[in-house]
Image: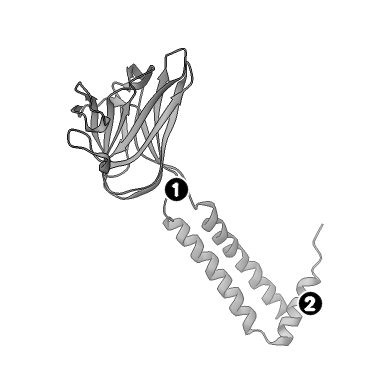
Amino acid sequence: MQSRLLSWHRAAWPFLLTGIFLGSGFAARADDLFSITGDVSAWTFADGLAIGWSSPVQTADLTISVLLDNRASAPSEATAYLTTSIGPGVSAASEIAETTVTLPASYHGPVDLFDVPVLAAGSYWLSFSAPTGDIAWAYADPAAIAGADGFDYIGYAEVVRPKGLYLPASAFYIDPDSSGYEIEVVANSEPPSALLTLGSISGLTALVLLRRRKRSLSPAGRLAAKTAATSVVPSK
């Protein structure tokens, strides 16, 4: 009786540990949703530039980054806008987020612009207003354009001067070419996967079975099992 109980426990624990591992170790991972990368063919003054993409589904916990350069010998500023559209008639009602970035002198590298809790399915534009300083955006041609299932590249855009007081409301020329300004949209976490669900079920199932087995023993049986477990001497 005691040996069967100990054997059953030894058989159940691997399922329990596997369930805990699968249920916790794969809970979250970063995932590229949309990106434009490649060898930089030019650095373009960022004032009046924009990039657009579309998403078929709601996404959450996003970081939007770009590759920028400050060629000035002093800090430079630019204002970035994340909106659902660009062009005449656009107002702040279409704005998702806005931020001002300050790059130190001679900076060159990636810049995290926005941390966005949730984006609904739809089209989005990232645009820059940089009337002072010398901030440039990396331009890749040809570009490696990648997106998760259903994510599409709308194109890159440049303001047709003069630009509006609210940059996204300016008139833009949009080019749906296979080139563009470098950007990366990353989901920092994702919903539980099938693997996570399977692991959670495995762990819970093992716990339930252990609990049921314990309840099925009589008081004398539980005492005998406890005594047997405490009398085990680890092998050297």
Q: Quadrant of residue 72?
A: top left
Q: What quarter of the picture does the N terminus occupy? A: bottom right
Residue type at tag 2: Thr
For the residue labelled by badge 1, is the local secondary structure a helix, a strand or a loop? Answer: loop
Q: Residues within 10 Å of mark 2 (few under 14, many from 20)?
A: few
Q: Residue at x 27, y 30 (%)?
A: 167
Q: Residue at x 29, y 21 (%)?
A: 141
Q: Is residue 169 left or right of residue 195?
A: left
Q: Is residue 18 above or below residue 213?
A: above
Q: Residue at x 39, y 34 (%)?
A: 99
Q: Quick one: label 2 or label 1, which is nearer the N terminus?
A: 1
Residue 80 percent across, percent down from the top left: 35, 31
Q: Is residue 54 visible?
A: no
Viewer-side residue, 211 vs 185: 185
Q: Residues within 10 Å of mark 1 (few under 14, many from 20)?
A: some
Work out how far the residue at label 2 is from the one at label 1, CA to CA, in angstroms. 46 Å
Label annotation for residue 20 = none
Viewer-side residue, 61 vs 148: 61
For the residue labelled by badge 2, is the local secondary structure a helix, a strand or a loop? Answer: helix
Residue 165 percent across, percent down from the top left: 26, 28
Viewer-side residue, 142 vs 115: 115
Residue 158 percent across, percent down from the top left: 23, 24
Q: Is residue 5 left or right of residue 84?
A: right
What residue is shown with label 1?
A: 189
Residue type at tag 1: Ser
Q: Is residue 157 visible?
A: yes
What residue is shown with label 2?
A: 227
